[in-house]
Image: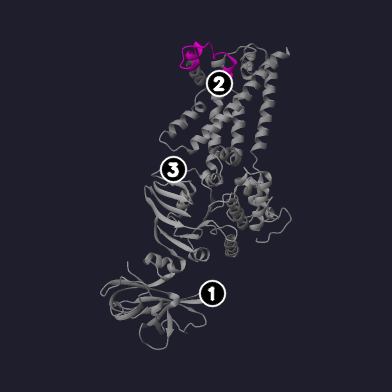
Amino acid sequence: MLKVEIKRTLPDFQLDVAFAIDGEVLGILGPSGSGKTMTLHCIAGLLSPNSGFIKLNDRVLFDDAQKVNLPPKARNVGLVFQNYALFPFLTAGENIAYGIRHHSRQEMNHRVQALIEKMGLQGLQNRYPLQLSAGQQQRVAVARALAPEPDVLLLDEPFSALDSLTKEQLEMQIMELRQFYKGNIILVTHDLAEAYRLSSRIAVYETGKIIQCDRKDKLISSPANQKVARLTRFRNFMDGIITNIQDKSVWVDIPDLGTNLRVFANGHKDLAVNQPITVGIRSEHVQAVAAPGQNIFCGTLNSSVENLASINCYFDLKTEKSGNRSLEAAFSKATAPQLIDGGSCYLYLPPEQIVIITN
Amino acid sequence: MISDYLSPLWISLKTVLLTTVITFILGIAAARWMSRYTGKLKPFIDGAFILPLVLPPTVVGFGLLLLLGKHGWIGHPLSLIGTTIVFSWPATVISAAVMAFPLMYMTTRGAFEQVDTNVEDAARTLGASEWRVLYSVTLPMAWPGVAAGTILSFARSLGEFGATLMLAGNIPGKTTTIPVAIYFAIQAGDMKQAVYLMAIVLCIAFVSLAALAYLKKPKARMRSLPGNLVPNDLLYTTGKKDKTA
């Protein structure tokens, strides 16, 4: 159990975050400069917060009220640095053994051997970091951090410097790591897909604050605000006013388009008629259909981009006022409508896929 | 007389070795402190540490004489307990150490500042004390710079003349180091002794420069960590092909 509630003030930045994890993987997601690494360094004791507390299991690592601030060496926190920070003058095996030198030689060798096997580093233990590939260096760094059996493992952008193939392999390795490391893991990343694959909960950072911290499926299905929605790849947003609420259905007037859009409340209980809200939909949830109807708009294809498995189409929707409203749709290649630039088709926004963002 | 050569050589060696040990320890301590220190006084402390390098050695020697002399701030209390430093063998060590210290300090500080703080922090999170971080991470990583500083301060104290003459004087068999002995040999017209002593100094200087070149050479494996680039020739040195690469 790790509980963190810290504030750290710098002249032009303030970190103010609170979260708790219990034997799970927490992903910290956010752009660079949002305080992700700073949070990890505060937990590891390399930086001191101005106020708040950090509790790990039944130990207090930092508490400004109790004047407790343990040095890094007394925290038993494993940290894997973004650039791995291996000791270049020690071999892979010696790197892994660095944190367990106080054990007997037999115990030390036993643990190093076990980690070398678990991390798939057989045959590499006598190489120096410079003689290892980036992926191997990263595995040595993880093994080194795990050797003292830390209560929490902090991974700082562990895959940022790797090519996509190595990255996939190492992600598998981190997932397998859960089989023998049952402690808390915090994974810092700026890649949503990576955070989604590896963690059970995700905290979204924005300039030093957590703007949403939820189970990963919840974060994806109901973003708390537009920033989270944008970060989780919602591409289309429309402002509107609620005109009618019936059971779970909500009708939203979109003044731009001059129509009512039907959406589902999806757990929002505080909705009221005449309340201004924003609705959002992912590009992959927009469907091309044959005939007009409820939640269906006529769009003119402006441009398209072909991806590996899908086609991203940028449509212009006809609006009441002058000027266009754009809508982004991603069709799988098999079902994409055959359109040329300037061609039109009907676009259906399924009510169950539209999210309501109240603030 | 052979002792005419051996005595200055012996005094010089004793002085230089002790001076090198002292500047090695003090230089590393000061460099470590200043590479972390961020207070307002930093430029002043830094300047004070480097000052002896800029001042003429006679000025440094004169300053030390004022400080350590019978009426000086340090010399007076010492004289009360019956100790005199001026014109004694320890004076050769003190003047050489003061002159050599800036070289050790500057070179070592530069090397310390180049060390990736993440690597030191990694050691801390692995349970290392500050002391262990210093000797097991910072010093090995800064080694080429530390070695260069040590050799430079060794060479500087071997060549020390001005400050030594001011503070320790020229007492044969007691404070006469090789440079002082050469100067007075020439003054006395004893060219033979001067040439012999010069040959000894040349030998020591050459050996220490060779040692510098040897110690400073960074080992291939120590040449910084690349992000994701691994030269192929290094990757395959053990003959085993790499699975993931």
Q: Quadrant of residue A350?
A: bottom left
The chain letter for the residue carrying disc 2 is: B
What's the amino acid at mark 3? Answer: Val
In the rendered structure, are the residues bearing label 1 and label 3 in contact, judged by CB atoms less than 8 Å apart? no
- The residue nearer to you, when weighing B117 against A116, is A116
What's the amino acid at mark 1? Answer: Leu
Give the residues in magenta.
Answer: B67-96
Task: Classify mark 1: residues with Cα within 10 Å, few (<14), some (14-19) or many (20+).
Answer: few
Circle 2 residue:
B94
What's the amino acid at mark 2? Answer: Ile
Circle 3 residue:
A68
Secondary structure under badge 1? loop
Left or right: where A51 falls relative to B245: left
Q: Quadrant of residue A276?
A: bottom left
- The residue nearer to you, when weighing A26 against A89, is A26
User: Whole-percent x and y of residue A102?
Assistant: 62, 42
Task: Classify mark 3: residues with Cα within 10 Å, few (<14), some (14-19) or many (20+).
Answer: few
User: Whole-percent x and y of residue A33?
Assistant: 43, 55
